[in-house]
Image (cartoon, rainbow, N blue to C red):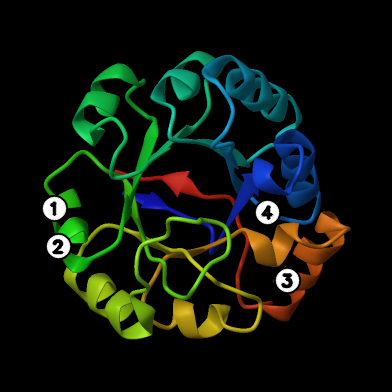
Amino acid sequence: MISLPPLYAVADAAFGDPVELARQLFDGGARLVQVRNKLAGAGALLRQVEATLQIVPKGCRVIVNDSVDVALLSGAAGVHLGQADLPAAKARSLLPPNSIIGVSTHSLAQALRCQTEPVDYIAAGPVFQTSTKSDAEPTIGLDGLREICASVKLPVVAIGGITRQNARAVLDCGVSSVAVISDLLRFEDVTHRTEEWLRYNSNLCQSPWTSTS
């Protein structure tokens, strides 16, 4: 089972160059960054992930959004899959043995189904309304998140509308980590905002995450 850092930062190309965003997130203290570019082709995404891996600090990790091929070719730590992406079992067969696989879930039924699949963690949400996806699923709220955390044995990453102010309430639901996008990236100085975010939530210990058997 993996242990995730409480802050799961996402370098989303909708907010700028994901390589530069990742650099600022790492400089601000993030220890796990997902590179996300929904509009890029495989070649462009591969170049961005490879460039990000050139600047990743020791003890930190990079996850690729959606693309198993890019995760494999780049040597990234793993991949995060949506419900419409390649099945986790197929991804597991293609990636190196220690690769991390996460899957987005939007209901208790989907979360429970992941427990029968070769998945390392699930993302549950959107918890609150989010502006980063035009086709976002209905919100599950804190009650729905709490039910998922109580029902699954996999680490849970909460996602969707999570801010500096509500992160504590989200973590109290039993999640292992909170995925944050706009509450970090919409600021001019992402490094400063990440530092500020972590100071405000000083209880979020940012030790490097590890894999355990």
- Secondary structure of the residue carrying tag 4 is loop
Quarter occupied by residue 39: top right
Q: Which residue corresponds to mark 4?
A: 30
Specify whether 177 is left or right of 33.
left
From the image, state whether disc 1 or disc 3 is nearer to you.
Answer: 1
Numbered circle sitting on residue 113: 1
Label pair 1/2, CB-CB below 8 angstroms: yes
Residue at (39%, 37%) from the top-left corner? Answer: 100
| Above/below status of 133 relative to 173 | above
- Residue type at tag 4: Ala
| Above/below status of 208 relative to 101 | below
Specify whether 189 is left or right of 77.
right
Specify whether 40 is left or right of 194.
left
Q: Which residue corresponds to mark 3?
A: 197
Quarter occupied by residue 95: top left
Q: Position of residue 92 (x, y in %)?
A: 27, 27
- Residue type at tag 2: Ala
**First of labels 4, 1 by sequence position:** 4
Residue at (79%, 56%) from the top-left corner? Answer: 28
- Secondary structure of the residue carrying tag 2 is helix
Q: Position of residue 207 (x, y in %)?
A: 60, 57
Q: Nearer the viewer, residue 194 or 153?
A: 194
Numbered circle sitting on residue 109: 2
From the image, state whether disc 4 or disc 1 is nearer to you.
Answer: 1
Numbered circle sitting on residue 77: none
Residue at (31%, 85%) from the top-left corner? Answer: 143
Q: How many marks?
A: 4
Q: CA distance from mark 4 to mark 1?
A: 30 Å
**First of labels 4, 2 by sequence position:** 4
